[in-house]
Amino acid sequence: MAWWAWIIFGVLMLSAELLAVDAQFYLVFAGIAAIIVGLADIGGPHLPAWVEWLSFAALAVLSMLTLRRHLYEKLRNRPLGSVDGDVGAKLTLVADLAPGQTCRAEYRGASWTALNVGSSAIPAGAEARIESVDGLTLKGRSAVSEE
């Protein structure tokens, strides 16, 4: 592929990530890899297309695996995949939840399992306070009993 095509491809991927799609920085690394391959094609010897594509794939995957988490945490000011900041937040349940039982709950646009760790039942429509998070399980108790 021509050097300018790699650079256009890289800019399009960066633009898609930053302007249209929230892919959590996956396209950023692919876009940067494409731009690097294009710049290398300008300054270096002309390589066969398969070498360029292999270089692009290797750069994209390696940079994604080594730099993505650090960059995501730095730019978003929160750890990737961590919901410990949600401890203390309130969650509204759509079904009755007896002590020690679980039910499905929607929280922040995702489906979770809610576990009642308190000693009193939480009626449907009532709020529960999140005490801890274990994988996709929100452990909480009735927000009314704490107040």
Image: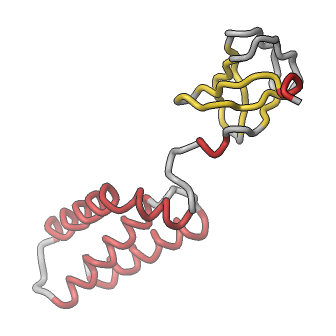
**Which residue is rendered at x = 47% and y = 73% of the image?**
12
User: Looking at the figure, which quarter contains the N terminus?
Assistant: bottom left
User: Looking at the figure, which quarter contains the C terminus?
Assistant: top right
**Colouring used for the render:** secondary structure
**Which residue is rendered at x = 34% and y = 59% of the image?**
64
Check the image and report above or below for 57 versus 129: below
From the viewer's side, name the closer residue of 110 and 13: 110
From the viewer's side, name the closer residue of 127 and 56: 127
Residue 110 falls in which quadrant of the image? Answer: top right
- Percent across and percent down for residue 71 are 44, 65
Check the image and report above or below for 12 versus 142: below
Q: 116 left or right of 75?
A: right
Residue 89 falls in which quadrant of the image? Answer: top right
Q: Residue furthest front?
A: 147
- Percent across and percent down for residue 120 are 81, 12
Number of labels in the image equals: 0
Residue 50 falls in which quadrant of the image? Answer: bottom left
- Percent across and percent down for residue 26 are 43, 58
**Which residue is rendered at x = 47% and y = 72% of the image?**
14
Q: 23 left or right of 123?
A: left
Q: 124 left or right of 11?
A: right
Q: Residue furthest bottom?
A: 43
**Which residue is rendered at x = 60% and y = 25% of the image?**
137
